[in-house]
Amino acid sequence: MRATTNGMRRWMRKAHALTGVVLALNLLLVVLTGAMIGHRELLRLEERTVSRTWLPHNYRPLDGDEVRADIVITDLHSGRLFGPRGPVVVDVLTLGAMLLIVSGAAMYLMRRGGNGTAPGPRNGGIPGRNEQITRKTNG
């Protein structure tokens, strides 16, 4: 049973780390574009444009050689910039972020032993404060 628990913990840590690495770039993109949308007046995004050379060839073809920056940033934030599948990709990445949160919480609860105490040396964790005090007074 113990080997199974350790194997599951190791697998969860690897899955959590891999998910975190994959989602880090998406999180950065969402945070930056969200901040830009929130401060569009301050950044004067309505007055700025983005050249077609930076955009996918099939993105808003009727808008001419340049597209307003606020539209591009909003579409990048939602995934619409990448076509019909873009929002689906954003949804999958959002589910991945939820998985990251749930796996982190599960690893935390597993580490705590499920009984609300800090892990001790018997289960491979760091001794809790009470265990250190007990050893000092008894040893």
Image (cartoon, rainbow, N blue to C red):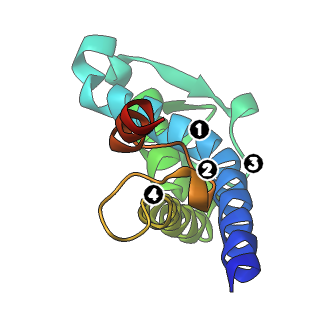
Residue 131 in percent (x, y) is at 40, 44
| Identity of the residue furthest to the front in this view | 138
Give SS at disc 1: loop
The CA distance from mark 4 to mark 1 is 52 Å
> In the rendered structure, which disc, 4 or 1, sits on the residue that comes first in sequence?
1
Pointer 2: what residue? 23
Asked if labels 2 and 3 touch by Cβ distance under 8 angstroms, the answer is: no
> In the rendered structure, which disc, 3 or 1, sits on the residue that comes first in sequence?
3
Rendered residue at 49%/43% (across/down): 127
Residue type at numbered disc 2: Leu
Which of the two marks, 3 or 1, is nearer to us in this view? 3
Residue 94 in percent (x, y) is at 48, 62
Residue 6 in percent (x, y) is at 71, 70
Pointer 4: what residue? 108
Pointer 1: what residue? 64
The CA distance from mark 3 to mark 2 is 26 Å
Which of the two marks, 4 or 2, is nearer to us in this view? 4
Q: Is residue 15 left or right of residue 75?
A: right
Residue type at numbered disc 1: Gly
The CA distance from mark 4 to mark 2 is 20 Å
Pointer 3: what residue? 57
Which of the two marks, 1 or 2, is nearer to us in this view? 2
Residue type at numbered disc 4: Tyr
Rendered residue at 49%/58% (across/down): 104
Give the answer, above or below, for where 130 lies relative to 122.
above
The CA distance from mark 3 to mark 1 is 12 Å
Give SS at disc 2: helix
